Image (tube, helix red, strand yellow):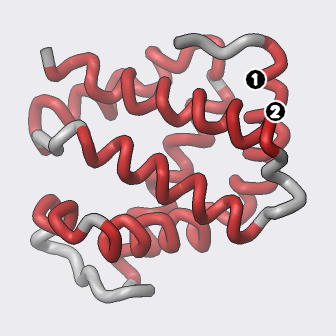
Amino acid sequence: MSLNDTDKARVKAVWAHVSTHAEEFGGEAINRMFAVYPSSKTYFPHFDTSPGSADIKAHGKRVMNALSEAVARIDDMAGALAKLSDLHAQKLRVDPVNFKHLSQCILVTIAAHGRNLLSAEAHLSLDKFLTLVAKLLICKYR
């Protein structure tokens, strides 16, 4: 899967708004993931996983900032995500399905906060972007 120029423009347009709310949107997406997919909490034994905790907000912000870097380097996303891919595959050993789960939670969060931002076309482009991010994050698992 690849992003065409129209997809890239849509992702950048949505992300211009999302990136200004990194902690809020990121924390909410992590909260959603923990609520909907509670098994994902197993990768965060050192976190306070209660909704709205400082740990969740901080991690959510880190996730959104990493995605912001991928958007900024949308033509070299593999390079932008290489260190995270290594970290997740080599050290953290996160089940790859969690990337898809988090992607879904990010989309729901953006939709809940930005109904005017997320047209059907923008949703499709953002879904393609997040699917590509997940694919790049798990490429080192093999």
Residue 44, x across and y down, in percent: 17, 66
The one nearer the camera, 60 or 6, is 6
Against 138, residue 142 (above or below) is: above
Mark 1: secondary structure: helix
Dot 2 alpha-carbon crowd within 10 angstroms: few under 14, some 14 to 19, many 20 or more: many
Instruction: Kindly identify which residue carries mark 1.
Output: 7
**Mark 2 secondary-structure assignment:** helix
Q: Is residue 83 left or right of residue 4?
A: left
Numbered circle sitting on residue 10: 2
Q: Is residue 18 above or below residue 124?
A: below
| Residue at 42% from the left image edge and 27% from the top image edge | 81
Coordinates of residue 75 in the picture (x, y in percent): 64, 12
Q: Position of residue 79 (x, y in %)?
A: 46, 16
Few, some or many residues within 10 Å of mark 1 (<14, 14–19, 20+): many
Three-letter amino acid code at the position of disc 1: Asp
Marks 2 and 1: CB-CB under 8 Å? yes
Callout 2 amino acid: Arg
The quarter holding residue 112 reads bottom right
Query: Is 6 rendered above or below residue 109?
Result: above
- Residue furthest to the right: 116
Distance between the Cα atoms at labels 2 and 1? 5 Å
